[in-house]
Amino acid sequence: MTRHLLDLDDLSPSELTRILDLADDPSRPPLLAGQTVGLYFEKPSLRTRHSCETAVVHLGGHPVTFRADEIGGSGRESMTDITRVLSGYHAILGARVFDHRVLEEMTACSQIPIVNLLSDRAHPCQVLADLLTMRQEWGSLAGATVAWIGDFNNVARSLALGAAMAGMHFRIASPVGFGPSPADIDRLILAGASGPPFMTDRPVEAAAGADAVHTDVWSSMGQEDEIAARRAAFEGFQVDAAVMAAATAKAVFMHCLPAHRGEEVATVVVDGPQSRVIVQAHNRLHAFRGLLRFLLEGTA
């Protein structure tokens, strides 16, 4: 059966651990020797493109990166036809898209693995790197507490799933209307959470006793027309020194980047000694290499 990764709950907890183990393994078996991996981008990218292309090279393959305007997706040609054609060229396809439904259309017809490199609903590759970073910090994930401050967006949704699968406690502080939906909570319980996450509208309360504090920008790509309204809604939700002081003394700060200093995070935090944002960014490479190895092991 062809394996796809649209979000982390496409994996079992043991498979998630296997990917993290492979990500921590510095060896580079030439599993992609003589093969290519197609990387489709509807959105600009720094970390995703460079980490994915480099991971493919590490495994002996050749990355082929292409944009929407180069293939005529959802215009000149259907995504179904595009995916069927590309499935005959590449060993794996990754896609960074605006609309998650594009990925669902691709997986419905693909004979090779499809990996979500980002969508409006999920960002599993980012969270693999996040989990890897936290595991490297503490040695184990089980029982640790992670706090999310801000919008329950694509990154937060995947992080909450990953935390549930890894036996972690997840807390969130968000304004009214920006937290998990009932469907999100049901999904977390199916993924292994013991119950609904701790939810509050007070960042300090969510961060109290946390081992890691995460946040993201208040407005993502595609939400430019909402910037002013979101700034007003998220006033008071900055991760600042007071929020970090509520966490444990050894707590780390994490952000998927790019960061808007002075908005969702204070400069003293993102550039301070508790910040792990650069390690986190570097782990995007190792996490994707681990994911590729896992997917290729399954097709060997």
Image (tube, rainbow, N blue to C red):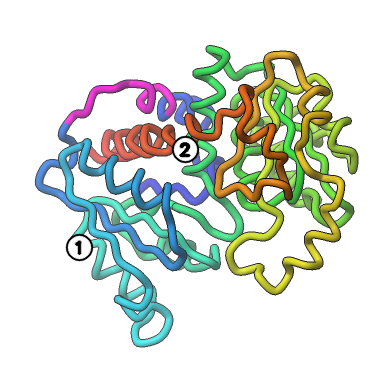
Tell me the residue at 26%/40% (across/down). 299
Res. 1 in view: no
Viewer-side residue, 216 vs 240? 240
Q: Position of residue 25 (x, y in %)?
A: 32, 21
Q: Mark 2 sits on what residue?
A: 281
Packing grade of label 2 (10 A; few <14, some 14-19, many >=20) is: many
Tell me the residue at 81%/67% (across/down). 229
Q: Mark 2 and mark 1 in contact (Cβ < 8 Å)?
A: no
Amino acid type at circle 1 is Gly
Packing grade of label 1 (10 A; few <14, some 14-19, many >=20) is: few
Q: Position of residue 244 (x, y in %)?
A: 76, 27
Q: Position of residue 49 (x, y in %)?
A: 36, 52
Q: Secondary structure at mark 1?
A: loop
Q: Point out the frontmost of discs 1 and 2.
A: 2
Instruction: Of the two numbered discs 1 and 2 on the same chain, state the one appearing first in sequence.
Output: 1
**Image height of 103 relative to 58, above or below:** below
Q: Mark 1 sits on what residue?
A: 88
Using residue 195 as the reference point, say whether residue 80 is left or right of it.
Answer: left
**Image height of 50 relative to 139, above or below:** below
Which residues are the magenta region?
20-29
Q: Which mark is residue 135?
A: none
Q: Secondary structure at mark 2?
A: helix
Tell me the residue at 28%/60% (across/down). 65
Tell me the residue at 32%/36% (across/down). 289
